Amino acid sequence: MRAVKIDGKILMEPGSRFKDEAQFYSVREKILSREIPEPGMMAHVIAPDKAKLGIESPFVMCGSDGTPGHPRLAGNFSRFLGYWTREQGVVDLMTALSKTSTQAALFLGLSNKGRIDLGADADVVIFNPATIKDKAGFGQDSMAPPEGIEYVIVNGKITVSRAKLVPGVLAGKTIRRTWAIPGTA
């Protein structure tokens, strides 16, 4: 992420928020007139009480559209399991695990994901439900690793060991849907 500069003067630093409505409209006008390039922006659009309603719904699962600079990039699932599940008690742990794995895999048509079973991909996250916590923030802190995740296994290879990335292990691969209609078995 870069600072927003106008006439060489820094108007906004990465990860900062608009000070007031006037600053927002000033930057917006300069973007629309192409005086400055469009910066990446993140907005808080869902109030916590509305997020809670969504999380409680049996039709909502956990996913991430995190982008560089946003805490969802590295902290989405650990926040769901730590904050919403353990601290707030919005869903129990088994429901949370289903929402972060099985439900999402079924909806996306990924028949070899979201479960531990013969024939399924060997993707496993070993975490401590009592300590899992997101540490990611906005801006430079968006890639801060979470607490409480001890091991991650991707395609049968250990990629995180004792809460540290294993250097040189690139086990991920492109995945494709295995059925045409999302959410149906």
Image (cartoon, grey):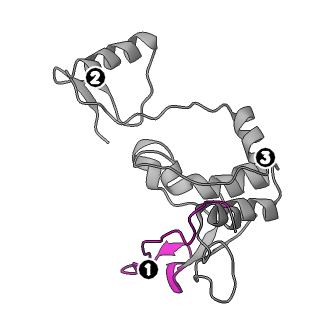
The boundaries of the magenta stretch are 154-183
Quadrant in the rendering for residue 26: top left
Asked whether the residues under the numbered discs 1 and 2 touch, taking CB atoms below 8 Å apart as contact, a structural biologist would say: no
Q: Residues within 10 Å of mark 1 (few under 14, many from 20)?
A: few
Residue 86, horizontal then vertical, whole percent: 78, 55
Dot in front, 1 or 3 = 3
Residue 107 in magenta stretch: no
Query: Helix or strand or loop: what does disc 1 sit on?
Result: loop
Asked whether residue 96 appears in the rendered view, the answer is: yes
Q: Check disc 2 and report the residue beneath it.
A: 31
Disc marking residue 171: 1
What residue sits 58% from the left and 83% below the top?
Answer: 122
Q: Nearer the viewer, residue 87 or 37?
A: 37
What residue sits 77% from the left and 50% below the top?
Answer: 87
Q: Distance between the residues labelled 1 and 2?
A: 40 Å
Which residue occupies the extreme left position in the image? 7
Asked whether residue 134 appears in the rendered view, the answer is: no
Query: Helix or strand or loop: what does disc 3 sit on?
Result: loop
- Amino acid, disc 3: Ser
Residue 185, horizontal then vertical, whole percent: 70, 69
Disc marking residue 57: 3
- Amino acid, disc 1: Ala
What residue sits 68% from the left and 63% below the top?
Answer: 184
Residue 22, horizontal then vertical, whole percent: 40, 10
What residue sits 32% from the left and 19% below the top?
Answer: 27
Q: Which of 173 and 150 is in front in this view?
A: 173
